[in-house]
Amino acid sequence: MPEEKLADQATAIEKNIKIALIQQDMTQRKLADFIGELPQQVSRAIHGGVDPKSRRIRKNIYKVLGMGGKE
């Protein structure tokens, strides 16, 4: 069960960020450039990575996209 919850949360994170990217007319690559991270690291964060770096990147993504700290 805990694994299913993690997967559901990761899917929700990805969905919310992708919707915000569309609303901002921004690609993941542009986002990565804007926050100064590698595209692979941004992708990992968007897909729900739980390591400290992914969490930090996700917080930056939320700020840039005006999502108000979803985590």
Image (cartoon, rainbow, N blue to C red):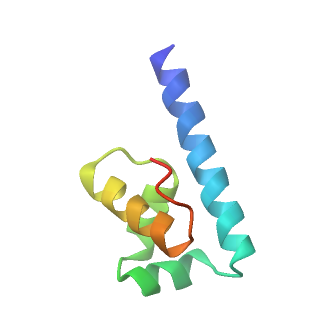
Q: Residue at x 44, y 47 (%)?
A: 71
**Image-based side of 15 in relation to 45, left or right:** right
Residue found at the far front of this picture: 68
Asked whether 40 or 69 is in front, the reply is 69
**Can you say whether 38 is above or below 9 in the image?**
below
Q: Residue at x 57, y 74 (%)?
A: 28
In percent of width and height, residue 39 lies at 45, 74
Q: Quadrant of residue 9?
A: top right
Q: Is 34 placed left or right of 56 in the picture?
A: right
Q: Residue 23: where, in percent of width, then height? A: 74, 73
Is 7 located above or below residue 51 in the figure? Answer: above
Q: Position of residue 32 (x, y in %)?
A: 45, 79
Q: How far from the left and from the top, in percent, is residue 24?
A: 68, 78
Along the line of sight, the residue nearer the viewer: 31 or 23: 23
Q: Name the residue furthest left.
A: 52
Residue at the image point whose x is 42% and y is 60% from the top: 58
- Which quadrant would residue 30 be assigned to in this image? bottom right
Total residue callouts = 0
From the viewer's perspective, is residue 12 above or below residue 7?
below
